[in-house]
Image (spheres, helix red, strand yellow):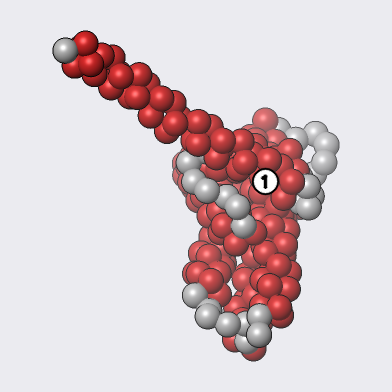
Amino acid sequence: MAQLKLLPLLLMVHSIFCTMGTVEPSFARRSRNRAYLEASCRSTRYPALCVQCLSGYANKTVLQSPQELAQLALSVSLNKALYTRAYLLKVARELKKMKAKEYQMVQDCTQQIDNGIDQLSQSIKELRRLNQEEAFSDQSFWHISNVETWVSAALTDATTCVDQFPVRNLSKLKATIKGKVLNMVQVTSNALALFHRYAASYGAGAAKKP
């Protein structure tokens, strides 16, 4: 009888430990993700921004390989480009109504970001094709080259937009535009660096296979 009375208590204790068991791995996973992310971001040009942009996503998924990190970084870069384009389109509409002289410059910049969005989208699709390769081959080199070419082109287009703005004496609007596009440039630069890291590890890993 005493054993029966102890049963609910034992079940409750077991439930507590099970709950703790499910929380701990989640915390441990976030810690591992964070450590891996910080180590990987050291290879980028803007490591602090790299960690800042990717850490929120890293808490929701497993990041334990250059492949996963490169895929995530390119997706974040694409999202940043989409956000930047939406802002530029809004500004362009307002400037057009005002017949402001800055309209054409913003319009040109929007076109460059549009090109970058297409190129980043293509690079993400190409990376998925690379990930589906069963063995390292000449086709793999082709996929890697395509991703590098498209991300580099997106970076060049966004940089061209930034270069239209002088270093000094910017109006508030121009400074805001430059800041948003420059942020996209830096995020894309980091994504390219992380992809280079993945491409190097992919080739090295494939070379070891029999």
Q: Residue furthest left?
A: 1
Q: For residue 66, which quarter of the picture?
A: bottom right
In the rendered view, tell whether residue 30 sits above or below residue 134: above
Q: Residues within 10 Å of mark 1 (few under 14, many from 20)?
A: some
Look at the image and tell me in which quarter the N terminus lies: top left
Q: Position of residue 179 (x, y in %)?
A: 68, 39
Q: For residue 19, which quarter of the picture?
A: top left
Q: Residue at x 71, y 80 (%)?
A: 207
Q: Nearer the viewer, residue 142 or 210?
A: 210
Q: Position of residue 181 (x, y in %)?
A: 65, 46
Q: Residue furthest front?
A: 1
Q: Residue at x 78, y 47 (%)?
A: 42
Q: Residue at x 44, y 31 (%)?
A: 21
Amino acid type, callout 1? Tyr
In the rendered view, tell whether residue 115 sits above or below residue 27: below
Q: Position of residue 182 (x, y in %)?
A: 70, 45
Q: In this rendering, does residue 158 appear at all?
A: no
Q: Position of residue 209 (x, y in %)?
A: 66, 80
In the rendered view, tell whether residue 119 sits above or below residue 25: below
Q: Nearer the viewer, residue 46 or 141?
A: 141
Residue identifier under label 1: 36
Q: Secondary structure at mark 1?
A: helix
